[in-house]
Amino acid sequence: MTFPPRPAFLGLAALTLVTDQVTKSYATAHLAPVGSVPILPGLLDLTYVRNQGAVFGLLRDVPAPWRGLILTLVPLLAIGLVLMLARGLAPGHRRARASLALVLGGALGNLIDRIRLGWVVDFVDLHVAGWHWPAFNVADSAICVGVALLALDLGRPARDPGSDARARHASDPV
């Protein structure tokens, strides 16, 4: 991939970022005053949470100055790594490029919260029989889906966009 990045890569990253920020804005405006709204009783609530830690609340017990430094530097490094990996992808690696765009958009979304607010707004609360999965948001979901898609793509050869056309021409009678 050459820089500037391909429009589809930037578009998916931007769509992820905008969706994340819009949903967090909605959660802040409408859920913060009421706390929680049941969507599917016994399974899913929308619950306003100020996440001081990392994904799923990790590192929330680290002292504040160190936590802030770690939770700002690590996403910045991840963003740099994502851009470097995306740059090195061959054109046929569409799924890998899409997965990196999801990770980029999600990382930027949570980093914006962390810099602007000092915490990340989470609001999706999945629970069953009193057990609650840690609250999360669109950015967290995009990062998890992006990493899962990237894991599926590991070791898979790139699809050469011209290979189908070459195969058809190779079998054509002369």
Image: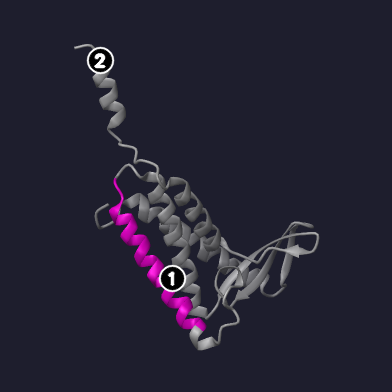
Q: Which type of secondary structure does the marked residue at label 2 adopt?
A: loop
Mark 1 closeness class: few <14, some 14–19, many ≥20 residues within 10 Å: some
Q: Which type of secondary structure does the marked residue at label 1 adopt?
A: helix
Q: Is residue 5 left or right of residue 20?
A: left
Image label count: 2
The percent position of residue 144, horizontal first and vertical second, equals 53, 57
Mark 2 closeness class: few <14, some 14–19, many ≥20 residues within 10 Å: few
Residue 140 location, quadrant: bottom right
The vertical placement of 22 against 153, above or below, is below
Q: Residue 153: which numbered mark, if any?
A: none
The percent position of residue 99, horizontal first and vertical second, equals 44, 52
Amino acid type at mark 1: Pro
The percent position of residue 126, horizontal first and vertical second, equals 70, 60
> Residue at 55% across / 77% down in the picture?
119
Residue 10 location, quadrant: bottom left
Residue sitting nearer the eye, 1 or 121: 1
Amino acid type at mark 2: Asp
The percent position of residue 109, horizontal first and vertical second, equals 48, 67
Residue wearing tag 2: 172
Residue sitting nearer the eye, 83 or 151: 151
Residue range corresponding to the magenta coloring: 67-90
> Residue at 44% across / 67% down in the picture?
108
